[in-house]
Image: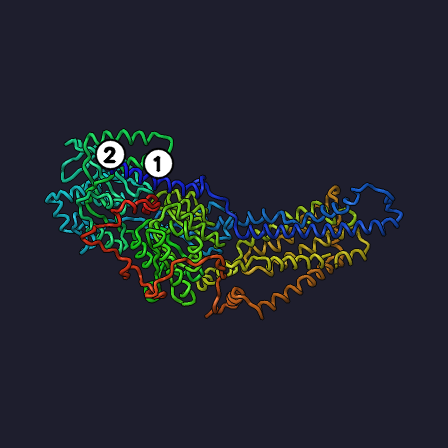
Amino acid sequence: MVLTSIGANVKLQYSIFLGNETKLGMTRGIPEPKLTAVDAMIDKLTGAIFVFQIVVVIVLGTAGNVWKDTEARKQWYVLYPQEFPWYELLVIPLRFELLCSIMIPISIKVSLDLVKSLYAKFIDWDYEMIDPETDTPSHATNTAISEDLAQVEYILTDKTGTLTENRMIFRRCCIGGIFYGNETGDALKDVGLLNAITSGSPDVIRFLTVMAVCNTVIPAKSKAGAILYKAQSQDEEALVHAAAQLHMVLVNKNASILEIKFNGSVLQYEILETLEFTSDRKRMSVVVKDCHSGNISLLSKGADEAILPYAHAGQQTRTFVEAVEQYSQLGLRTLCLAWREVEEDEYQEWSLMFKEASSTLIDREWRIAEVCQRLEHDLKVLGVTAIEDRLQDGVPETIETLRKAGINFWMLTGDKQNTAIQIALSCNFISPEPKGQLLSIDGKTEDEVCRSLERVLLTMRITTSEPKDVAFVVDGWALEIALKHYRKAFTELAILSRTAICCRVTPSQKAQLVELLKSCDYRTLAIGDGGNDVRMIQKADIGVGISGREGLQAARAADYSIGSLSGTSLFNSVSLMAYNVFYTSIPVLVSTIDKDLSEGTVMQHPQILFYCQAGRLLNPSTFAGWFGRSLFHAIVAFVISIHVYAYEKSEMEEVSMVALSGCIWLQAFVVALETNSFTVFQHLAIWGNLVAFYIINWIFSAIPSSGMYTIMFRLCSQPSYWITMFLIVAAGMGPIVALKYFRYTYRASKINILQQAERMGGPILSLGTIEPQPRAIEKDVAPLSITQPRSRSPVYEPLLSDSPNTRRSFGSGTPFDFFQSPSRLSSIYSRNCKDN
């Protein structure tokens, strides 16, 4: 009956879990196409240009038809017939459509793609982004989203291997209620532990056996004869190394036979079955048979909530709970180790069910989990291990600099809450009291989570106007309830908070949080190093994968691994093609090496990135300015060229070449005016492009069949041509220069101030305040129905480590009640979490 109840319970949890997985998307692991803010803006602006083009075609087409009916028929040489078919009305509008088709900036997509590819290469070539330890360079897999890097507003980061080194070191342990390593900080040098091993303490020997046997580590011998360990999990490698230093050495693993050397004797175990670690089970077990005695044992290790609830009824687990809490307060990663003997008949019966579940094609994962649950019970808990994972160099300074740039941080981890909080404190992720304030969202039921969420929201609303650094922490269990039942309220909380710590979260929950922030129109960057971060990385606007110790899954899935009434065109086809493809592309491509500000200035004033996040550098107003400038220049190049050369009674080809020359000259001066940091390449691109224009047209002017025969030679020999170029440049650039001077002098932006300071060589002591882009909170976010207790202060909320309400106590009467209740295990959270 007990096993049937456990199996039904697991089935319920797994069905809920699979339902959520289905909701998140059946295409698991397939990335969605990513559209940058610039691409989205260009698409909208292209649509606006198309609408403008249609309006021009309709207006000019109507005017042309009216002119044809009123004036053209009076001219005898036009020879318009008195009667014509109905579709004749469409001829003139269609001609204007063909003539105006050049308005659509077809080449801009090609130019942008080339520019983005160059930016991506700059990332690949950046020597400062090479990992000095592994000599691994950065790599831009996705070359289409480089510009979004400057518009990131939220960074969602994994903890292990991202903020920390993922270099695990065995530090402390608790075996049979005795703590080792508390005084020295290194259990491997603890005299008490070494004496227990020498005296042959059964609990200690069994504890070391589980460390050495319960894993997927592969031992191998080097040429020098030393034993090397290859492991997918850094935790397992640290445990096996620690066991070896304590004389329990894993020396060989062939097929199903595993050899251990302990104090000169060789122990052999036959691995009968391996119950693999999964994100929902949060534990791993092996069924082994002692080759000497023939006894069968189950060895298990895993998270505290995945091991301690399954202890046999007579065992007191209070000491182990205290050990887990103590180690978590120190920022150490914890694992619980347990074992039990298995009778031969029980194993044979279970083995048949396990093989059947492993071979089934329907609900295979659930069937395997259910069968594993039938064996993983009545465990004898041996103890707790504590592993240190140190911060990477420069993490606190990096986070502080990015915060000044207005970037918010969320930590998404599978670790315990206290461990994550201590790491967050040490890397400046959150600030301690009184500068900072950490609020907790917890609860195991909808009612408890509702109360907690309302209390945190109320505090957030009150402290939003204060300079205090307010953050919130939530575990996977409460997060699942909040996202399912109180999504709007949690969305408001996400908007109000700059920092969040999400603990014991699953890969799917990480992806859901990214999607939540994206739904609020925030630009997100997700960074991680493990396979459990892949979905988060793929869901974010920008995904960064670290080529770390957990393999290359994250790195491989990421975007970065660290245009006349006659129906004849004024210009010939060669000139149009060259202008669109060549003349306008070269200056744009070389502008990739232009810098608005130097790296030193940006690092000194990181808050300048608020301009990028708010989209102030590319928006409809800036587009309108450039569009207006282009119309003005078009008028200048044609109110001057046509007037001068029509008076000269020149050929149409000469007029078109004069107008095109004026456009090229104006383009050169506009690009030069907008360039901030001149280099040799930019001078060559701007003025070399102008020279190339004349060289190419001289070549075509020398070809009789080109349609441009002798035109350029004749124009360049006329003084009126050069006077016209001077007039076009003066008339076109005069107002532009005047407006730019007015803006820099009287309405200078923060970027303009910094640019002027760089040119003058003087320091900027203060930029003043740059406000981030405000975000509107949804008006239909209804307040939660449960009110806050009057006796509780709505503002004061101490850090969790000092809060009596968050420190669980377990009396002798009800030991570990949280895990003993079967109903507690019915949540999706308990089946989904995975330690990072």
Given this view, does label 2 or label 1 mark the residue nearer the observer? Answer: 1
For label 1, the residue is 365
Q: Is residue 140 left or right of residue 529?
A: right
Query: x%, y% of residue 647?
Result: 81, 57
Query: Is residue 160 shown to the viewer in this render?
Result: no
Q: Residues within 10 Å of mark 1 (few under 14, many from 20)?
A: some
| Camera-nearest residue between 391 and 773 | 773
Where disc 1 sits, the SS reads helix
Query: x%, y% of residue 78?
Result: 86, 46
Q: Quadrant of the N terminus?
A: top left
Residue under the point 79% across and 43% down: 88
For label 2, the residue is 253
Query: Is residue 621 shown to the viewer in this render?
Result: yes
**Amino acid bearing label 2:** Lys
Cα gap from disc 2 to disc 1, whole angstroms: 27 Å
Furthest-left residue in view?
Answer: 199
Q: For residue 643, which numbered disc appears in the image?
A: none
| Camera-nearest residue between 702 and 440 | 440
